Image (cartoon, rainbow, N blue to C red):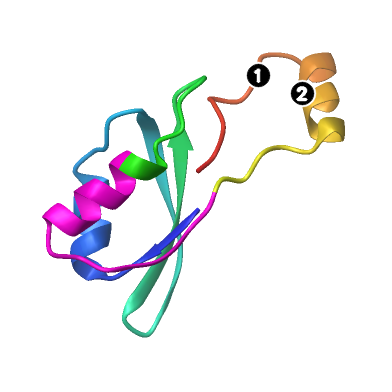
């Protein structure tokens, strides 16, 4: 999950190596919260930071969000798995 300014959000939307999807979670003044879905086995946080900074953007928060063990078991029992870890 990330919290970025407008330039940072635009950079993330253009695509970051190791990511597969971006979900807009909301805005808070000049900041945009988004969930960045990582490709399996990839930690894209460095690439996200580099893309935001290269675009002249600002990053206020960036953290990995791993699924709880219960969610992993539930997903395995209910069918196909979700696309990658979230950053």
In the rendered structure, the answer to whether residue 41 lies left or right of residue 31 reads right
Residue found at x 84% / y 16%: 77
Compared to residue 66, the image places residue 35 above or below, namely below
Q: Position of residue 69 (x, y in %)?
A: 83, 32
Question: Could you say where residue 45 lies in the image, as x and y percent from the top left?
Answer: 40, 43
Magenta highlight range: 47-63
Residue 51 covered by magenta stretch:
yes
Q: Earlier in the sequence, mark 1 or mark 2?
A: 2
Q: Position of residue 31 (x, y in %)?
A: 36, 75
Query: Which disc number belongs to residue 81?
Result: 1
| Residue at mark 2 | 75
In-front residue for pair 4/74? 4
Say which residue appears at 74% left-offset and 14% top-offset: 79
> Callout 2: helix, strand or loop?
helix
Indicate left or right for 72 with 12 as reference. Answer: right
Q: Residues within 10 Å of mark 2 (few under 14, many from 20)?
A: few
Question: Is disc 1 surrounded by few (<14), some (14 to 19) or many (20+) residues within 10 Å?
Answer: few
| Above or below, comparing residue 81 to residue 62 in the picture | above
Residue sitting at 28 percent across and 71 percent down?
5
**Tag 1 near tag 2, CB within 8 Å:** yes
């Amino acid at each position: 999950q990330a919290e970025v300014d407008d330039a940072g959000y635009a950079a993330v939307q253009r695509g970051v190596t190791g990511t597969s999807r971006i979900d807009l979670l909301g805005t808070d003044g000049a900041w945009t919260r988004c969930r960045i879905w990582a490709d399996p086995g990839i930690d894209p946080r460095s690439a996200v930071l580099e893309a935001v900074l290269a675009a002249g953007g600002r990053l206020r928060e960036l953290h990995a969000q791993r699924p709880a063990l219960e969610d992993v078991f539930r997903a395995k029992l209910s069918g196909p798995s979700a696309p990658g870890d979230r950053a």
